[in-house]
Every structure is written in C-alpha cells, then in structure tokens.
C-alpha cells in the first residue's frame, strides 16, 4: 500500500492565502498530505482550521478571495497548482469529485436528480445518457436508496435529507473518479440517518477502490470512515497517524483535548419532592400549524425548578414545535400549559409582561438570533431596561454584571457588534440576553449544535453553573445524545409528534428501552473504529436509520 | 495638413505604443481601437470630427480627474468605516458624489451664485450668450444661467421633499404591514395594488387637474403616487427580516410594533431602502420635470428645468443648444445619482471581491 506508484495525491507544503482588509493573510501554513489509491484520509479540526480549504485545494481549487500561494498539489502525476484551467476542468467531476455538506443546497432544485446525475458523464463523453441513467440506478441500489429505479426521477425536495446526501454521493461516483472529497457529508443529518449514509459511503468507496478525503469535526464519525487521520489547528497540521494509533495514543496535547471533550457529565439531580409544583407543566397538548394537520399529539411533561429536561428526537419529531407552544408562538389546539400551577393564555400576545419575562429562549443559530445592527450593550440592555425599568448607570451596571456572568470582559465587549464575535461568544450573548430578563425558565433550542465541540462544552458548563447559581429550569431541545448525557436530569423522547418515552436520565440510559429510544441510542457513533461494523453486523442493514422506522 | 491633425495622430500613436510597452492590455485595446476609429472618422468627417473626439475625450478625462481627486480628498478627510468605503469606491461613484455636491451647493446658495433674479428680465428675448448672460437669454429675455441655478433649488428641492414624503409613508406602512401581517397586511397590500394599476402620468394629471396646481398639492400628489413601489419594497425586505430569530425574541419579550420597526427591522433594511431612495428620487424628479413640461408642474415664473425646456423648445429648430442645457442638467443629475446608487447596491448586495 505504501508503494510509490500507488500514490494518487501528493500535497507538499501547501500554503493558502485569503484576502481581507486589503491584505493577503496566510490561512494554511504548509500542509503535507499523501493519499494512496483506495485510501481514506480523515481531516479533522474545529471550524476555521482550514479543513474545507485544504479539501478544495486538493482539486486545485481555491474559493473566491483565496489563492494557493505556495507548495505543490500533485494528482496522479499532474501538478494542479500550475495546470491551465481547461486541464483542471477536465479533471474535476471526472477524476476528482466533491460531495458538499448540504446536499439540499448543492442540488439544483429545478432539475430531477437523475438529470443532474448524468450531466457529468455525458459532458465528459464517458457514458451515453442512457448508460449513465442505468448506472445511476445501479448506484442508487448499491447505496440502498428505496426504489432505485424510480427515485432518480424525483426533484430534490421530494426526497429526504439522508437520501439526498446518498444521491449526491452517487452523483460523485457517476464518472468513477479516483478521488472523492467528502466535506462534512453527515453534519446536517440526524444520528439515525447519518448511520445509513456513513455505511453506504464506506461501502461504495470500498467497492470501487476510490480514494477519499473525509472532512469532519466529529471524531466518532471519522473513526469509522478513515484509514488515517490528520488533525488540523488554524491551518497547521497537529499530527497524523493511522486511525487506531490516533485513537489509542494521541501524542499532541491539542489532540488529547479534542478526544476528552465528551467527558463533561453532570450527575443527575435528586428527583423533585412529590408535592412540588413544576415550573412548567405541559398537559395533553395537541398543536398544528394550519389548524388541520396535527404536529403534536398529547404531549405532556413537567419541568421543575433547578432541573433540566432534555427533549430528544429526530428533526420533524415536534421538539421545537413543543417549545413554540410553551412560549405562546403557536397556540395549542387542545391541552394546556401551566406556569407554576397557573394556566397560561395560549397566545403570547395575551400573556402579561411578567409571564413573558419568566420564560426566555436561547436559539440554535446565534447569527440569526442577534440583531446584527445592535451593539452588545443594546442587545443585553434592552430586556433589562424593558422589564426592569433600568436606566443610565444602573442599566450599565446590570449589563456589566451579565457580561461577567457569561465570562466575557465587559469593557472589551460592551460596544461591539455581533459580527465582531466568534460563534461561541455570540451564543454567550444569546444566553446573557435571556438572563437579562431574570427568568425562572429557559428554553434552549439546540444551543450547542452549531458550535465546535470544545466551544460547545464551554457553553454547557456555563449553562450548568448558571443553573446552580440562579436555580433555573431548562428545557433542552437537542438531537445530540451526548449533550443529553452531560446535562439532563429528565429525558423526554419524541417521535412524530408524540412522546415515546420519558423518565429520569439514569433510567433512560439503562435498558430496557422503547424500540425507538434504543434505535436513537444505538445510532450515536462511538470512538471505537469497529463500532459501525459491529453495529451493522448486529442489527443488519435493514435495521438502522430510516429503514428501521418501517419495522416499528 | 494642419498641425492639429499631425499632433492628434502623433499623440494617439505614441500613447498606444506606451500602453503596449507597459503591457497594459485594457489601455492598449482602448487606444488602439480609438486610433483605428480616428482614421475612419478623420477621412469621413475631416478635422471637425477629430475635434469632437478630442473634446469628448477631454471631457471624460476631466470627469475622471475630478472623480479621482475628489476620491483622494474624501479619503484624506474621512475616518473609519466611511474612509474604507470611499477608498474602494469606483470613480463613477465619486464622480456622482461630486456632481450631487455641486447641485446641492447650487441649490442652497442660489441667490448668491445667480447674477440675476429668476424672474428678472435682463436683455432681449433669446439673446445670445455674452459676458452678462453666460448662457444667453430665454424667450422673455431672462438670464438662462440664473434660471438654471434657481431651477436646481426648485426642481431638486421639491423632488427631494416629495421623495422623502413618499418614503416616510411607504416605509412606515410597508414595515407595519410586514410586522402585523394577517388582514392588516392584506388590506394595505391590495389597496396599494389598486393604486399601482393606474398609469402614473395619467393619474397625476387627473389628480392635479382636480386639486389645482400649487406646489403643496404637487408634492402631496406625487408623493402618494410613489408610495406603492416604496411600500412593496419595504414590505418585501421586511418580510425576510421578520422571520429572523431576533425578531421572534423581541416579540416574545412583548415589544410594541413600533419598537420592532424602528429598532429591529429598520437598521437591517436600510441598505436597499437607501439605494431605492436614490432611484425613486430620479423618477420623481423626472416626473416633476415632465409635468412642468406639460404645464401642470411648477407654475411660471418659478424657474424649473422641465418648463425651461418647454419654453425654449422653439429654439431647437434654429440649431441652438439653449433648450438642451436644462435637459442636460436633468440628465447629468440623474446619471450621477444612478452612479452612486449602483455603488450602494453593489455594496449592500454583498458582492464585494
């Protein structure tokens, strides 16, 4: 495998610069990579580590505002950095293919899947249109897409996210390339869907002996996919070794810290007293967006002061809809929401200022949750001024206090705009805005899923500390079971608008489970490189992911 | 062969060679094609045609020079964000800014700049240009230049007032419709559709003949006519903003619609609205000029560019350019504003390289 002639891609001292503020900045500082035929290389690192940039550079491509400023990229003996554009164009799609993170955004929504699939082979005159079409169906079957004969004739919005990602992989395979670059292909998917995509990608790469670069920030995922792993930090290589060595004995401190991220776990708090009145009590709630097609059916659970209730489920299971019912954005059709024993009006417009103040929300995307044209002092100051009638120096004192609480230095951040903060800092501001209202209950809607693991852990610790200090009740909406394990006291599992199972955390993580909970739990990737293989052997390919739903 | 022609070709060929030597592709192609065109034009049109080319080229060069120096001036005198923006601005934008500044100065200081009053009869009708009347006289013997300067004040001032009024009404209603939604939105949007279905000029003629033509009715009528497009833009822009999480957060806080509009939506919708403001201003301005030309706009003896074109229109048959001067003033301002608006749209669309 290490024979010199098998080397497919050789990257030496790759340097990439980006243009910002009228200057060129180096963002990748000399990275080496060697990839043999049929080998899978995993690139991992936090956002901003240069993973995607390096992945694209392996095709000889640099994004707008970036340029390859040094080093060499040699693909099968062809030097890509100096090749004319026409030569590069002939390679891309035909011999090097790219699978993007969001398949939904990468497919043209107004063409059928198969038309987009056959485009490249027909263009490069590798196959005739009909041949390519048959080949597509074969690939769809190999990737275990349902109805492989028919699914290609649908439009991208007519298939699910996981299926779309597999169709995208099939499309990348259409010319039988030598190298495929997977850029976070499963990040946007649910755990149960992810597993299917992972299994099929691994299968097909194996079958055609294709080399691949697999870019991700999820260690457990890369452990399943890659032969070798390269860890990146801010455009520098930290270390590289084969998967097992990397997992068992990482050398560098940074790698060790990445490995240790999932260690944060808080013990479950004692159960609340029998006669304690829950802060929020959801009882038999049904809800629908259009008044006819119900999204929620008989949802009930209680949230007690100082406790965290984690609501888990796949996308579309009604987690966020439940939160919208509680906050009053979506009036329920049936049932009631009580706050400290007092029934709340269904519409938020009918609730009193004090009722609104007590329940706050933290959003998933801090980018859209903070007004980009407001300064930090206004973002946090507004709720404080609005509810507490604070003005002038009093208000400033309160804002400083809140910034201290979220561990940001008040002087430095007071007059900044959200765009001048990092993702984790933005999320902290979102938390501060919720705290500014002095609430007793906070809905956390996927607050950590858009963040890097190290940053996410920081946010979880912060939320936990705040809960201890202020005796807050949290409703934690998440699809990430690792988050649940670290912070929850009580777990509610939802599926298609119904509560499937609920109970204290310790009970939920010990068998026996409801079959759906079991599926969710078993689908969470583990750091063991054999995990996927073992799981597939144990359960069989038809009992994971979307396919498993049919058996329930 | 006159020394002018010899000099003309020598300069052109020399410049082409210099461009070629420095491998400046765009400059070379431009000069070379100009050279080829000059040969043809010179053969057909003779020295006069070459003179025209020289004058036009000199004008463009002067405009570029003004734009460049003005940009340098702004870069030095401004600070922070504004400086950064100006530094990267194209020359067309700074030229536009410069011309708008000239118009504003003319409008504000009209009584000081203009040598005569706007209704003052100075010489004989259609008097040719001399030292007293820089651009000659109009059909009543009033000074063309003075009237042009006063015209800037009247036409531009009224257009500005009207556009502001239209934007105030349109934006407020549009944002309110987006925030409130439901039947409120429907009623507003549908009534605006009705307003929009009537042809602008016909509608304004109708309204003006009903309510009479004094300045205040003119302003109000034109403002109302331009509310629908502004309303639709504001509503569309706000429609994308009200779905953001920070608006939801503000709603859940119990904020009043007015706070949502002024503090949360407007700052994020300002870029397209400002760009639209520049564009609408041109339309309003042209409509006022058009109405004046038809006799329904500003009433004489108030100087205004539209009616100035109309009053002097007979001169065009004698080969005089006098009626074209106010028309040129309109054209120059419109072009300048559009240069600036293009630049702003480019910036706000995020298409920065």
Image (tube, coloured by chain):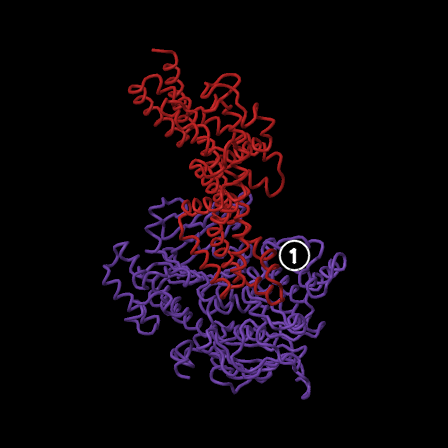
Chain colours: A purple, B red
Q: Residues within 10 Å of mark 1 (few under 14, many from 20)?
A: many
Residue B101 percent location from the top left of the image: 56, 34
Q: Quadrant of the N terminus of chain B?
A: top left
Q: Is residue A320 above or below residue A404?
A: below
Q: Measuring 60% from the left and 73% from the top, which residue is drawn there?
A: A350
Q: Is residue A470 left or right of residue A481?
A: right
Q: Nearer the viewer, residue A528 or B3?
A: B3
Q: Is residue B325 above or below residue A170?
A: above
Q: Is residue B213 left or right of residue A548?
A: right
Q: Is residue B323 left or right of residue A239?
A: left
Residue A348 percent location from the top left of the image: 59, 71
Q: Is residue B94 visible?
A: yes
Residue B82 percent location from the top left of the image: 59, 41
Reading the image, the residue beneath label 1 is: A376
Q: Nearer the viewer, residue A175 or B161?
A: B161
**Chain of the residue under the numbered disc 1 shown in the image:** A
* In the image, farthest residue toward the right: A393
Q: Measuring 46% from the left and 69% from the top, which residue is drawn there?
A: A189
Q: Is residue B181 above or below residue A345?
A: above
Q: Quadrant of residue A277?
A: bottom right
């Amino acid at each position: 495998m290490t024979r010199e002639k098998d080397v497919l891609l050789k990257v030496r001292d790759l340097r990439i610069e980006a243009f910002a503020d009228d200057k060129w900045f180096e963002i990748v500082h000399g990275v080496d990579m060697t990839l043999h035929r049929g080998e899978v290389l995993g690139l991992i690192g936090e956002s901003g580590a240069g993973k995607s940039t390096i992945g694209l550079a392996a095709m000889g491509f640099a994004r707008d505002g970036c340029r390859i400023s040094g080093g060499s990229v040699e693909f099968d003996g062809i030097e890509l950095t100096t090749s004319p554009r026409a030569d590069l164009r002939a390679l891309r799609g035909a011999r090097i293919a790219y699978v993007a993170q969001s398949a939904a955004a990468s497919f043209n929504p107004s063409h059928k899947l198969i038309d987009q699939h056959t485009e490249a082979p027909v263009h490069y005159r590798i196959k005739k249109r009909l041949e390519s079409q048959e080949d597509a169906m074969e690939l769809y079957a190999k990737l275990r897409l349902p109805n492989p004969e028919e699914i290609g004739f649908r439009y991208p919005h007519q298939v699910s996210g996981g299926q779309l990602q597999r169709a995208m992989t099939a499309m990348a395979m259409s010319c039988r390339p030598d190298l495929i670059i997977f850029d976070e292909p499963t990040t946007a998917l649910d755990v149960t869907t992810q597993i299917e995509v992972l299994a099929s990608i691994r299968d097909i790469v194996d079958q055609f002996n294709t080399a691949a670069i697999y870019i991700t920030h999820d260690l457990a995922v890369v452990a399943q996919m890659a032969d070798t792993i390269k860890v990146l930090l801010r455009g520098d290589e930290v270390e590289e070794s084969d998967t097992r060595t990397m997992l068992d004995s990482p050398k560098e401190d940074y790698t060790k810290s990445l490995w240790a991220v999932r260690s944060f776990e808080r013990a479950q708090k004692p159960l609340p007293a029998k006669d304690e009145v829950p802060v929020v009590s959801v009882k038999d709630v049904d809800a629908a967006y259009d008044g006819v097609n119900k999204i929620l059916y008989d949802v009930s659970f209680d949230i007690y002061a100082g406790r965290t209730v984690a609501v888990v489920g796949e996308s579309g299971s009604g987690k966020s809809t439940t939160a919208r019912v509680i906050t009053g954005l979506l009036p329920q059709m049936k049932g009631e929401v009580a706050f400290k024993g007092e029934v709340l009006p269904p519409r938020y417009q009918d609730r009193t200022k004090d009722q609104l103040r007590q329940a706050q929300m933290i959003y998933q995307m801090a980018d859209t949750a903070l007004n980009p044209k407001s300064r930090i002092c206004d973002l946090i100051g507004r709720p404080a001024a609005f509810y507490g009638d604070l003005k002038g120096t009093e208000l400033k004192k309160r804002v400083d206090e809140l910034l201290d609480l979220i561990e940001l230095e008040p002087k430095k951040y007071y007059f900044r705009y959200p765009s001048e903060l990092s993702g984790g800092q933005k999320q902290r501001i979102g938390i501060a805005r919720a705290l500014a209202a002095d609430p007793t209950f906070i809905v956390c809607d996927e607050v950590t899923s858009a963040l890097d693991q190290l940053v996410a852990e920081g946010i979880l610790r912060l939320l936990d500390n705040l809960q201890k200090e202020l005796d807050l009740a949290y409703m934690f909406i998440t699809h990430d079971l690792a988050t649940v394990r670290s912070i929850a006291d009580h777990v509610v599992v939802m599926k298609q608008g119904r509560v499937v199972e609920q109970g204290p955390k310790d009970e939920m993580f010990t068998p026996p489970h409801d079959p759906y909970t079991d599926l969710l739990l078993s689908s969470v990737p583990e750091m063991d490189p054999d995990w996927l293989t073992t799981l597939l052997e144990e359960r069989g390919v038809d009992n994971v992911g979307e396919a498993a739903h049919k058996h329930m | 062969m006159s020394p002018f022609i010899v000099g003309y070709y020598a300069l052109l060929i020399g410049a082409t060679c210099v461009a070629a030597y420095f491998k400046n592709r765009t400059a070379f192609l431009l000069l070379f094609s100009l050279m080829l065109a000059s040969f043809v034009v010179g053969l057909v049109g003779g020295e006069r045609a070459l003179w025209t080319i020289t004058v036009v080229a000199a004008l463009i060069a002067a405009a570029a020079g003004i734009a460049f120096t003005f940009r340098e001036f702004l870069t030095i005198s401004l600070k922070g964000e504004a400086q950064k923006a100006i530094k990267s601005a194209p020359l067309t934008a700074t030229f536009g800014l410069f011309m708008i500044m000239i118009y504003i100065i003319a409008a504000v200081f009209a009584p000081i700049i203009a040598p005569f009053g706007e209704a003052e009869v100075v010489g004989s009708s259609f008097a040719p240009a001399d030292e007293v009347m820089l651009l000659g006289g109009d059909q009543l013997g009033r000074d063309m230049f003075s009237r042009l300067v006063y015209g800037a004040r009247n036409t531009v001032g009224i257009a500005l007032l009207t556009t502001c009024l239209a934007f105030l009404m349109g934006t407020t209603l549009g944002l309110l419709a987006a925030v409130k939604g439901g039947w409120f939105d429907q009623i507003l949007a549908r009534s605006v559709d009705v307003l929009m279905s009537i042809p602008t000029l016909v509608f304004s003629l109708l309204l003006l003949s009903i309510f009479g033509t004094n300045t205040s009715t003119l302003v109000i009528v034109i403002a109302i006519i331009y509310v629908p497009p502004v309303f639709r833009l504001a509503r569309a822009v706000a429609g994308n903003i009200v779905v953001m999480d920070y608006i939801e957060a503000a709603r859940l806080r119990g904020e009043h619609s007015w706070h949502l509009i002024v503090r949360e939506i407007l700052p994020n919708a300002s870029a397209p609205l400002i760009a639209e403001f520049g564009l609408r201003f041109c339309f309003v301005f042209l409509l006022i000029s058009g109405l004046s030309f038809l006799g329904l706009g500003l009433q004489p003896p108030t100087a205004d560019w539209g009616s100035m074109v109309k009053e002097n229109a007979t001169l065009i048959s004698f080969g005089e350019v006098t009626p074209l001067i106010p028309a040129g003033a309109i054209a120059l301002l419109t072009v300048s504003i559009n240069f600036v608006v293009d630049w702003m749209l480019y910036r706000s669309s995020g298409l920065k390289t």
